[in-house]
Image (tube, helix red, strand yellow):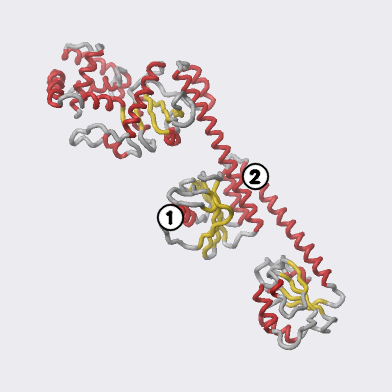
Amino acid sequence: MALRPVAGIPGSATPGRGGVLDAVVRWVAVSELADPTPYLEGGELLLTTGMRMEGDQTQYVARLVARGVAGLGFGVGVSHEEVPAALVSAADEAGLPLLEVPRETPFIAIGKAVSELLAAEQYEEITRAFAAQGRLTRAALRPEGMHAVIDRLAKEVGGWAALLEESGEVRHATRGANTDAVVAELTRLRAPEGATREGEGTAHATGDTTPAGWGAGRAGPLPASLALSGPGEHIVVQPLAGGARPRGFFAVGAEEPFSPVTHTVINAAGSLLTLAMEQGRTQLEAVRRTRSAVLELLLGGAKEQARAVLRPLGGRLPEEPLAVLAADADAIETLEPHAFAALLGDDGAHQGAGSLAVTLVAALVAEKAALEADGPVGVSLPCGYAPESLHGALGQARRALEAARSGWAPAIPLGAATGRNSARANGRGRVVRFGELAGQGLLGLLDPAAVQAFAAALLAPLTAYGAKPDLVGSLRAYLDSNGHWDAAAQRLGVHRHTLRYRMKRVTELLGRDLDDPGVRAELWLALQATRR
């Protein structure tokens, strides 16, 4: 509270601003000592009758000012009939508020009055804090959720607020948010021990500490909150969803330092944001468990039941022919937006240690979806929803993933490092197709010259036919699509009837039955050899 109401002078100036009567009073103390400062903490209204006060009072006042005393009340009519002129002069020169206390006003009455004013002020602050918490809670119930809480928090503190991802990426921020300073500080904390980065202002760790989790590479405990101070700006940063690894951060900034009430409001906003984040993750985990159950139904041959379970989630299964993608469990977050993805454990379709992220996607866009993953991905050959087909494709994807993890890569012909192969090299993770994996392994066992001669002889009738239509390319697309007419036709950009005509010509020119598995194997081997 300010000294002004204690003096009985009307006004509503903000404590800490304006004249000397706006000094903040935290308590009342009475002392007749020549130097009472060893018994003061600062912020007191000191009352005295001046029993030992004689002569120059410059040193006495200087000690009070240095201690941070809010004001001096001098009781007249006991030791002095009026306030000594030397004291008035010293107080005026030092800027110390000096009040004259009449004889009829007991010091105890002043102490009671200040206590009542402080209690009223604290009650008003608590009321304001509760009201602010109510407004924040109502904001949390709005459709905008966490964004609405951030917007409301900025208004409550009279500044700005921002919500950041675990990585430090800004998720939502109000106008004027100094997110650059926040991101820079988070980046500094993530740096390995010993690495420093210059920045504006000073960062102070506050509160308890949590294990290293604010950033990889830093050892030892890290602060549970940060206070950044700079010219004309004060910022508080807090992690969300506490623990060893925060799942996000929020920051609040204002021109003036935050009061205890404002800190209470900030903490309340942090609790609401953490609750909203945890609820969102709980819902996401429930959805993922449902998807794992859907995958289990599909592997068991219950396709219609799987569709029925998935329908309330707004999800859809891809149409046949489809491909199975296998990736590490961490890749689930990047694969989910693009296709049906579920976590599959080592002993069934459930989440747990050793889980894989299994994705079902239309065969035509399998590689495009695979390149969205952060990490290695194995891609199966085209398949259907029949249990044996789906189980086989899952096994193919697993084996391709193992090859991708080991760094295996298909041989790329000279001058062919463009298109699909280039996409694999430049993607965020290594992508390996099972078809290429199996073909590369078989060809590696054979003599290259013999294989090339075999391929040239077998495909000679097709290459001699000419490039229009491209019978070799059409045959490759047909075999790569596992004999699925629609998938192969779409890959070539032709009608399936056109493809059927071309395959009829291939059969006539080669004098071989394409429905014979042995013939298909020989042709596939020859086509793979031409890619080397």
The secondary structure type at the circle numbered 1 is: loop
Q: Is residue 281 visible?
A: yes
Name the foreground residue: 77 vs 218.
218
**Residue lying furthest front in this view?**
220
Query: Who's the residue at 63% across and 49% down the image?
Result: 268
Q: Residue furthest bottom?
A: 55
Say which element carries label 2: helix
Residue found 68% across the figure and 66% down from its top: 15
Query: Does residue 193 sit above or below 492 in this rendering?
Result: below
Marks 1 & 2, CB-CB < 8 Å contact: no
Which mark sits nearer the N-terminus, 1 or 2?
2
Q: Quadrant of residue 355?
A: top left
The amino acid sitting under disc 1 is Glu
Taking the image as shown, residue 450 lies to the left or right of residue 497, namely left
- Quote the CA–CA distance across marks 1 and 2: 39 Å
Image location of residue 456, percent across then percent down: 13, 22
Determine which quarter of the picture holds residue 147.
Answer: top right
Q: Nearer the viewer, mark 1 or mark 2?
A: 1
User: Mark 2: few, some, or many residues within 10 Å (few <14, many ≥20)?
Assistant: some
Residue 9 visible to the viewer: no
Q: Closest to the observer: 118 or 479? A: 118
Badge 2 is on which residue?
Answer: 137
| Residue 464 in picture, x, y percent from top left | 12, 21
Compared with 194, 53 (above or below) is: below
The residue under the point 43% across, 50% down is 217
Q: Which residue is mark 1?
A: 193
